[in-house]
């Protein structure tokens, strides 16, 4: 799965426990009718992928959805979801005319010469 949008926040790398588990979060705001602020976590060596990105940059993030079950001390079962990133790439803003053929400069066109009002075609439109 992928999420595309603009980076709103890039968090600092956090280290947990004696085993050195690392986590870093980024918030990506989608650009749609109802923008969503999606928090995506990168873990372990993937935290370094965020080093070359900055707030405001347009990105596409490869994600996995993760779900966990946890039973609290009172015996109640709780469920937690997380969005985990594994790839991130910059998205270039593409001009709308990129797929259009090039337009020749105005001086490449010559004005029509002898136009006569009586010369007309019989097209119905």
Image (tube, rainbow, N blue to C red):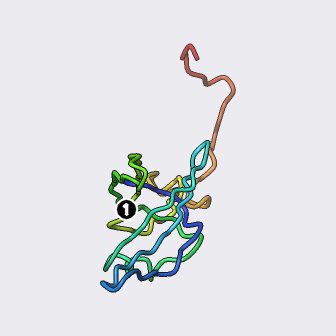
How far across and down, in percent of the image, does residue 67 sit? 34, 52
Which residue is painted at 53% across and 61% down in the image? 28
Compare residues 51 and 116 and report the one nearer the observer: 51
Q: Which residue is mark 1?
A: 84
Q: Is label 1 in a helix, a strand or a loop?
A: strand
Relative to 21, does residue 58 appear above or below in the rendering? Answer: above
> Which residue occupies the extreme front position in the image?
74
Residue 67 visible somewhere in the drawing: no
Which residue is painted at 55% across and 67% down in the image? 7
How far across and down, in percent of the image, does residue 78 sit? 41, 48
| Disc 1 packing (10 Å; few <14; some 14–19; many ≥20) | some
- Marks counted in the figure total 1
Residue 29 visible somewhere in the drawing: yes
Compare residues 78 and 45 and report the one nearer the observer: 78
How far across and down, in percent of the image, does residue 10 sit? 54, 74
Compare residues 19 and 65 and report the one nearer the observer: 19
Q: Is residue 1 left or right of residue 5?
A: left
**Rendered image quadrant of residue 24:** bottom left
Q: Is residue 67 left or right of residue 90?
A: left
Compare residues 118 and 31 and report the one nearer the observer: 31
How far across and down, in percent of the image, does residue 30 sit? 54, 53
> Which residue occupies the extreme top position in the image?
124
Which residue is painted at 36% across and 52% down in the image? 71
Point out the image quarter for the C terminus: top right
Which residue is painted at 50% across and 61% down in the image? 39
């Amino acid at each position: 799965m992928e999420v595309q949008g603009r980076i709103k926040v890039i968090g600092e790398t956090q280290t947990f426990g004696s085993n050195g588990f690392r986590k870093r979060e980024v918030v990506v705001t989608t650009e749609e009718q109802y923008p969503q602020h999606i928090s995506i976590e990168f873990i372990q060596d993937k935290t370094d992928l965020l080093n070359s990105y900055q707030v405001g940059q347009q990105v596409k993030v490869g994600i996995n959805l993760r779900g966990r079950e946890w039973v609290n001390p009172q015996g109640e079962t709780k469920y937690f979801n997380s969005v985990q990133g594994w790839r991130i790439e910059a998205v270039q803003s593409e001009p709308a005319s990129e797929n259009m053929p090039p337009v020749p400069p105005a001086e490449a066109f010559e004005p029509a010469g002898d136009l006569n009002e009586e010369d007309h075609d019989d097209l119905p439109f």
